[in-house]
Image (cartoon, rainbow, N blue to C red):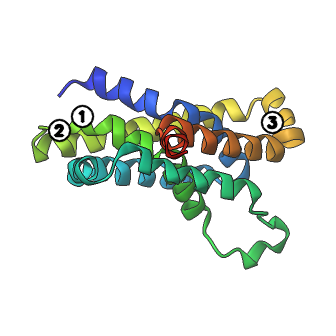
């Protein structure tokens, strides 16, 4: 097990989501974002380890591109914060679902070759290592998000920028997975 490769893989898979964490940290408490993000990472790592080969065998990569619908849906779904107590989903669940919708395809495609051949004990060590990196990343981004210039900018433009990010990420998932290319070949 190479910790440098695991760290580089974690950063490369999550780099685009780090920006989204700023928005989520402005909306939810630090511990809620940490737990939702950690849960998302651990679930996707486990999926890569346990069922990754089955997905690669039975589902073509372009089909995972359909997951791009989820961030686009989130961009157009108006989350009414004024209702406070009437929210249907918990903040942890919202962070978790956001992470899965944005990063599932990349995580499954990139972590699968890294985790193939690891023993179960090595996999458990990998879970702990990636879990620690996940918590560290959220904490560091939380520090950045608390800078006055960042806070002012996010408060003024955060909702619009987050919606734009969701849409761009959704279309990127469509493109990167090969879904658009596959659909164009049908015509």
Q: Is residue 153 left or right of residue 134?
A: right
Query: Could you classify mark 1 by the number of other residues whose Cα lies within 10 Å: few (under 14), some (14-19), or many (20 or more)?
Result: few
* Mark nearer the N terminus (3 vs 1): 1
Query: Could you classify mark 3 by the number of other residues whose Cα lies within 10 Å: few (under 14), some (14-19), or many (20 or more)?
Result: some
Residue at left offset 28%, top offset 47%: 48
Query: What residue would you read off at disc 2?
Result: 116
Q: Is residue 63 left or right of residue 50?
A: right
Q: Position of residue 1 (x, y in %)?
A: 17, 28
Query: What residue would you read off at disc 3?
Result: 151
Observer-side mark, 3 or 1, equals: 1
Q: Are marks 1 and 2 in contact (CB under 8 Å)?
A: yes
Query: What residue would you read off at disc 1?
Result: 113
Vertical arrangement, residue 153 with respect to residue 52, above or below: above
Quarter of the image for residue 82 reads bottom right
Observer-side mark, 2 or 3, equals: 2
Between the residue at mark 2 and the residue at mark 3, the CA separation in whole angstroms equals 41 Å
């Amino acid at each position: 097990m190479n910790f440098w490769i695991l760290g580089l893989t974690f950063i490369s898979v999550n780099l685009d989501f780090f920006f989204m964490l700023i928005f989520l940290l402005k909306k939810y408490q630090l511990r809620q974002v940490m737990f939702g993000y950690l849960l998302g990472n651990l679930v996707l790592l486990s999926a890569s380890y346990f069922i990754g080969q089955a997905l690669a065998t039975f589902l073509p990569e372009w089909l995972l591109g359909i997951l791009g619908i989820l961030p686009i849906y989130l961009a157009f779904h108006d989350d009414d914060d004024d209702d406070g107590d009437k929210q249907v989903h918990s903040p942890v669940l919202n962070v978790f679902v956001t992470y899965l919708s944005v990063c599932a395809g990349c995580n499954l495609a990139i972590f699968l070759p890294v985790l193939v051949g690891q023993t179960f004990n090595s996999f458990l060590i990998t879970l702990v290592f990636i879990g620690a990196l996940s918590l560290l990343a959220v904490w560091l981004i939380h520090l950045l998000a608390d800078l006055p210039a960042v806070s002012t900018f996010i408060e003024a433009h955060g909702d619009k920028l987050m919606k734009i990010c969701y849409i761009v990420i959704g279309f990127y998932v469509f493109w990167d997975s090969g879904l658009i290319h596959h659909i164009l070949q049908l015509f």
